[in-house]
Each structure stands twice: as structure tokens, then as C-alpha cells.
Image (cartoon, rainbow, N blue to C red):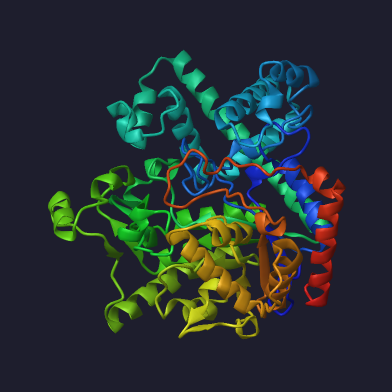
């Protein structure tokens, strides 16, 4: 696939969980993704971007994965014969246990979806153990051997989670379970029958990952056949309660929580404005990772490269330095209204800071840059032909973007944020090695900004008006004094401006493409609505809608006009 920045292309970003079809099981999966790929290709897009697909924890956040390698089981398409071990009778039986109509509503009901898909996978695994051909058993064994560097630790962790009633917090398990060495010693002391049962559970989790790799490999091949590149996402960190931290404790600094510094742009989050974003991810012990040849990072990149043609590193700034909090996110409320000295009293003098060092001196900047390039060099080497993109938004040191360009890593251009010295940067001045987009999964859609600017009040409305004014300037949008209509007037202008920019890749968030207002995530807010919203229409309904067909015909014309087809 031609992913050279010499050729300008465009893509669409959609959370997989939010995609829908008429016969899905309450969440987007690889089968719906195939339909979405076909639809995107018909419009003229060359890239389909997804959020992380790693296995999620109890908070359902794709950016807080419980494994940096394992694939989220709810992304799997489960139907008779998929996997091969699932029969029609088994499938029909399990579907009678749930109200599928209720499951397919506008929000993902994670508990119900997981329960149903787990039962289907359990039945498929039983059939596999009892009936699988020698050839299929050999393929499974080969997968287990090939991926053993991470798979065995992961399988043990998942079986222990199950043994602890689905509770992921390993530091609250019985003492004998809390480290990988003590857990294996405990397992060795159990009765043979119990050990065999536990081993079967480990094999079940290996089986699920085998099926996942097969299905994702197939959808990647389908994308290639349609001329579409799949773009994945690597979050900079992993969950404190992940299989990775559990098994490789020595590679993580667990007494600090990674995040981002105070950011005034997020008007709906007082903690972020005052203290920053505390994601709760443990910091890396880079020196220990270096001593091990960065084997964990190499495995991580190989895992994502198996499923995607290119990938975005979320918070690539973390490779250079990361903002560290001396408390876990669960304690954020206790610090919200404190002054600096009051905070220090609570933390014993430890303060939020950039680690390993800030950017206050040229020596610090040089050291951060040198180390960041070393770590990213490992990622690039392991990615091979896969192109790497860096999400370089937020408080960005002056040396980061030149450093990324020198490595061949494309950074981001958010037009309303490309505002320097009182001037909005025109798209004609964007570096070719960049990705232009108005919004990501963390931003309100442009239509939502429009409505907020017209009808809202307070800080959020002020911010929306400011952002819209910058977007209008970027789009060279000049309109007579008559009343404006978003879809008739503003939408075509901003899409043309985005595609006309010099950026190699122009990406449109699915909500912006469809001119919708709803959000998939509000950053810094621990809301039950985050990561649950589904699209209002299925892919086939979008195809059948005269209004949406007309909109997509416009997008295709604009892509052709700007040389992105």
C-alpha cells in the first residue's frame, strides 16, 4: 500500500464499539468493521482509523487496557462457524438467554455484551477441545509457542482475575496471588485436579487470543483488497492493573501516576484546569527496559503491526518526558481545591512534575530529546514498513516536533489550535509530514461547537465561539449576512479547507463526517456515558439514506478536487 507522504490521502476515524449493523450483538466488531471499510472505500477514503483494540478493564476505557498485547474479546465477530468451533445450535441457544433487541440500543451495555460473547466463546472452546482437527490443534499450539513471551503471563493473569471474582486489582488479591512468582508457586502447591482445571482456564484465554488474531488478520487483508489502510492506536501507558505490570513489576515505577500538565482548554473539567490530567498509568523504568533490550516495547509494536498498517502513538510526548502525579486518580477530589502548600503537606513534599526532568534548561531539553529519540527509534525499527504517527498535542516543548520530523513521524495539526502570534496558520503552510483533523475522540464535534456557540453560555460557550472563529478563518469562510445553516454553508467550507491543506493525511471524525453532535468521550470525566455511545444508524442505513448519500457524494467530490483520491 502506498502510504508515502508524497501522496496526499484522507481517512475517517470511528470507535469500533460505536459502529453498528442490523445483526450485531450490541457492540461494533470486525464484521461491522468490514462493512465500514467498504463504505469508506466507496466514498474515497484511504485510511480507517480506530481507537485502541486492546483488552479493556472494568472502566471500559480503550486507553486503560489490562494488556498491551491482548485483543479485546468483544471486538470478535461470533456467529455460526465463526470461530469454526461455534455451531448453529450453540449460537441459537446462547441468544435465547438475552434480549438481543435491548442489547442493540444506542448505548453499549458492556456487562451484558461481555457475558453473551463470553458464553459463546466458552462453548466454542469446549467444542474445540472435543472435536478440533489435528491441523487446527497444531495451529493453536504454534500460536501459543510463537506468542509465549507475553501470552503465558497474560493467561495466568486472566485466570487469576477469574479466580478473584473478576477483580483486576492484583494488589488487593490474596497475598499468594499478588506477584507472578508467588502465584506460580501457589499454583504448584495445589492438587493435580485443580491444577488441570486452572490450566484449562489459561488455555481458554489463549484460545480467545488465537481467534482474535485470526479475525483481525482477516479484516486487515480485506482492507488491503479495498485499498484501505487500517490505522491503530498505541496508548503511551498501560493500566496499573494490567497483565503487563503484574508480570513485569520491575519495569514500572508504581509510586507515580502519569498524565498531562494543567490545561485550560478543557473548560468542563476543573481538575484538569487546575492540576492536569491524572491518568493513573505507572511510569516506565526506562533504564530497566534498556537493560532488557526493550523487549516489552518490541512485543507491543509487533502486536499492533499484526493488525494495522499504520498506527498512532497516543501522547507521544511521554517518550520525551511525562507529567507525574504523586497520587492515584482515585484521590483527585481530595486535591481539587487545595493550594500548592496544602498539597505538599498531603504528599509528604512530593509534587506533580515532569519526569525524568522538566524542560527548564537547555541541558534538560537536550537530554529529554536524546532519550525520546532513542525510545522511539526502537518503535520505528520494530514497526518495519508500518508508518508511525505521533499524537503531539497539549503542552509541547519546542524540540519535540522537529525531533519527530527528523524521525519521519507525522505529528498532528488541529486547525483551531494552530494559532500563533494572533494568526491562524493556513493549511497551505502545514508540513506535509502531518495529520490534519478538526477533532479527535477527545474533542466536541464541530456541530456541537456550533450549537454551543449559538445557544450556550459560560466558559464552554466562549471556548466554542473562539474555536469556531479560528476554524472559519482557516476555511477562509466568508458569508453574507443572511442566516447561516451549518450543513448547507459551514460544513462544505470546512471540509474543503481540511482536504485542501498540505498535510499528508486529513482525518475526519465520524461525528464530523455525519454532522452529528454526540460524543464518545469527555476527557478527565469518569462518566458512565464515556465509551458507550453507538452511532444512530447502521452502515446499511447510512448507505440507504438519500441525505447521507448526497453528503458522501459531496465528500467524494471534495476529495477528488483536492487530489486526495
Q: Residue at x 56, y 29 (%)?
A: 203
- 241 or 250, which is in the foreground? 241
Q: Residue at x 53, y 49 (%)?
A: 521
Which residue does the image show at 15% across and 56% down from the upper left? 344
The image position of residue 532, as x and y in percent, is 57, 40
Q: Where residue 230 appears, x then y in whole percent? A: 69, 57
Figure check: 36 above or below 475: above
Left or right position of 282 against 559: left
In the image, is 556 to the left or to the right of 277? right
In the rendered image, the quadrant that contains the C terminus is bottom right
Residue nearest the viewer, comparing 11 with 547? 547
Res 261 seen here: yes
Q: Quadrant of residue 46?
A: bottom right
Which quarter of the figure is the N terminus placed in? bottom right
Residue 165 horizontal side relative to residue 33, left or right: left
- Regarding residue 283, the answer to whether it shows in the image is no
The quadrant where residue 131 appears: top right
Looking at the rendering, which quadrant does residue 431 occupy?
bottom right
Amino acid at each position: 500500500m502506498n502510504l508515502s507522504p508524497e501522496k496526499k490521502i484522507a481517512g475517517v476515524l470511528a470507535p469500533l464499539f460505536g459502529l453498528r449493523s442490523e445483526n450485531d450483538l450490541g457492540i461494533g466488531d470486525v464484521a461491522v468493521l468490514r462493512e465500514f471499510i467498504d463504505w469508506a472505500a466507496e466514498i474515497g477514503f484511504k485510511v480507517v482509523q480506530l481507537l485502541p483494540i486492546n483488552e479493556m478493564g472494568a472502566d471500559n476505557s480503550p486507553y486503560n487496557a489490562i494488556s498491551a498485547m491482548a485483543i479485546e474479546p468483544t471486538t470478535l465477530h461470533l456467529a455460526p462457524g465463526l470461530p469454526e468451533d461455534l455451531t448453529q445450535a450453540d449460537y441459537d441457544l446462547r441468544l435465547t438467554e438475552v434480549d438481543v433487541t435491548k442489547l442493540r440500543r444506542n448505548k453499549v451495555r458492556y456487562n451484558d455484551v461481555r457475558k453473551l460473547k463470553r458464553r459463546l466463546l466458552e462453548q466454542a472452546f469446549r467444542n474445540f477441545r472435543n472435536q478440533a482437527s489435528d491441523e487446527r490443534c497444531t495451529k493453536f499450539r504454534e500460536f501459543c509457542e510463537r506468542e509465549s513471551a507475553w501470552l503465558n503471563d497474560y493467561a495466568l493473569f486472566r485466570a487469576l482475575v477469574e479466580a478473584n471474582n473478576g477483580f483486576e486489582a492484583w494488589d488487593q488479591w490474596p497475598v499468594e496471588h499478588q506477584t507472578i512468582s508467588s502465584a506460580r508457586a501457589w499454583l504448584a502447591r495445589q492438587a493435580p485436579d485443580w491444577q488441570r482445571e486452572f490450566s484449562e482456564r489459561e488455555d481458554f484465554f489463549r484460545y480467545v487470543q488465537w481467534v482474535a488474531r485470526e479475525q483481525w488478520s482477516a479484516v486487515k487483508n480485506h482492507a488491503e483488497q479495498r485499498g484501505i489502510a487500517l490505522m491503530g492506536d498505541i496508548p503511551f501507558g498501560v493500566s496499573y492493573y494490567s497483565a503487563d505490570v503484574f508480570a513485569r513489576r520491575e519495569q514500572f515505577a508504581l509510586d507515580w501516576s502519569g498524565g498531562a500538565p494543567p490545561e485550560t482548554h478543557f473548560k468542563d473539567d476543573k481538575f484538569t484546569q487546575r492540576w492536569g490530567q491524572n491518568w493513573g498509568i505507572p511510569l516506565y523504568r526506562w533504564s530497566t527496559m534498556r537493560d532488557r533490550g526493550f523487549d516489552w516495547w518490541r512485543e507491543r509494536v509487533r502486536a499492533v503491526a499484526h493488525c494495522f498498517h499504520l498506527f498512532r502513538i497516543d501522547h507521544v510526548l511521554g517518550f520525551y518526558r511525562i507529567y507525574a502525579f504523586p497520587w492515584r486518580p482515585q484521590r483527585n477530589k481530595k486535591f481539587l481545591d487545595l493550594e500548592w502548600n496544602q498539597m505538599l503537606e498531603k504528599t509528604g513534599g512530593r509534587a506533580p512534575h515532569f519526569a525524568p526532568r522538566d524542560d527548564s534548561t537547555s541541558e534538560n531539553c537536550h537530554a529529554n530529546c536524546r532519550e525520546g529519540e532513542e525510545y522511539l527509534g526502537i518503535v520505528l525499527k520494530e514497526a518495519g514498513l508500518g508508518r508511525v504517527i505521533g499524537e503531539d498535542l497539549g503542552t509541547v516543548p519546542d524540540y519535540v516536533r522537529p525531533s519527530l520530523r527528523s524521525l519521519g513521524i507525522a505529528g498532528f495539526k488541529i486547525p483551531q489550535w494552530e494559532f500563533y502570534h494572533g494568526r491562524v496558520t493556513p493549511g497551505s503552510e502545514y508540513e506535509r509530514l502531518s495529520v490534519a483533523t478538526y477533532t479527535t475522540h477527545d474533542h466536541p464535534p464541530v456541530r456541537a461547537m456550533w450549537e454551543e456557540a449559538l445557544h450556550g453560555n459560560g466558559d464552554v460557550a466562549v471556548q466554542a465561539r473562539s474555536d469556531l472563529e479560528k476554524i472559519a478563518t482557516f476555511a477562509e469562510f466568508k458569508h453574507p449576512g443572511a442566516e447561516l445553516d451549518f450543513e448547507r454553508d459551514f460544513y462544505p467550507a470546512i471540509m474543503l479547507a481540511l482536504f485542501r491543506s498540505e498535510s499528508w493525511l486529513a482525518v475526519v471524525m465520524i461525528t464530523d463526517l455525519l454532522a452529528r453532535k454526540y460524543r464518545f468521550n469527555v476527557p478527565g470525566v469518569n462518566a458512565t456515558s464515556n465509551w458507550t455511545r453507538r452511532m444512530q444508524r447502521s452502515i446499511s442505513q447510512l448507505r440507504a439514506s438519500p441525505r447521507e448519500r448526497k453528503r458522501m457524494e459531496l465528500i467524494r467530490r471534495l476529495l477528488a478536487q483536492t487530489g486526495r483520491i
